[in-house]
Amino acid sequence: MRGNSNAPKLRTRVTRVKNPKSATPEVPRYAVQDEIRLDPGRTALVVIDMQNDLVKQGGSLLVPDAKATVPAIRRLLDRARSSRMRVVYIQDTHRQGDPEWQIWPEHCREGTWGWEIVAELAPRADETVLSKVRHDAFYGTPLDHLLRGWRIDTLVICGTVANIGVYYTAASAALRWYAIVVPRDAISALEPFDLETLLRQTALVLGGRLTTADGVRVG
Ligand code: ZN
């Protein structure tokens, strides 16, 4: 797109307005289950974009609460690994001139420190890592092909950003009729409002189930 003068300009001038009544909107109810029991042979744990740029101090697109979700994601990984559940890492990956950098600050440039998955959650050699170029981890990746080959019908989706990579991936999975589970303490967003948006949409629109990291049980 770069160098093409006919390309649409993504950056627009906006006037930020406060909520006119300066009221916090009420979050509609959604159910969070204490426990969800899953068949590890039919389930994959999908870890979205837990990369230095989004999680670590000094990252170029820091999500304030992402670091706090690392222990919960770690516990999900431990449980998945000990039950031989498939684990798929999604790694946001951009290159020079990516139009997404007109919307967000430059982030997750392939090969840089910011692009790397945080050390605490480092993938094992036998785990799948897929580079994604847009918010949806199915877009332009072999994710669907791999999941179908493994006979997976349920995805536990965690990581960041809740209403971006996590939500678009969950939505894309639900449209393909995968069952969705989102542990709410294993996701993070730029604003609490955004996190609630994902949870409400997942429960209401995707038919997804919400729980906590410790609520995800196997066997
Ligand atoms: Zn990105």
Image: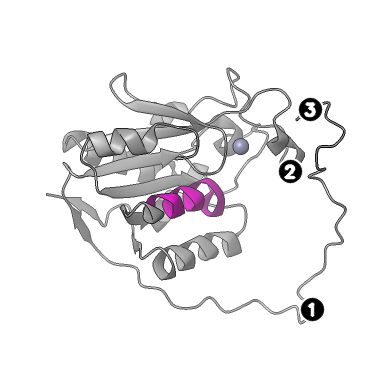
Is 182 colored magenta in this rendering? Answer: no
| Residue 75 seen by the camera | no
**Residue for badge 1:** 20
Q: Residue at x 31, y 26 (%)?
A: 127
Residue type at numbered disc 3: Arg
Q: Residue at x 61, y 29 (%)?
A: 108
Residue type at numbered disc 2: Ile
**Residue 142 image offset from top left, x and y in percent:** 39, 31
Kindly state the secondary structure of the residue where label 3 is placed.
Answer: loop
Is 168 colored magenta in this rendering? Answer: yes
Q: Does the residue tagged 3 have its C-beta within 8 Å of any atom of ligand 1?
A: no
The residue at the far left in this view is: 219
**Residue for badge 2:** 103
The front one of 4 and 42 is 4
Q: Which residues are magenta?
A: 161-173
**Residue for badge 3:** 2
> Quarter-wise, where is residue 203 in the image?
bottom left
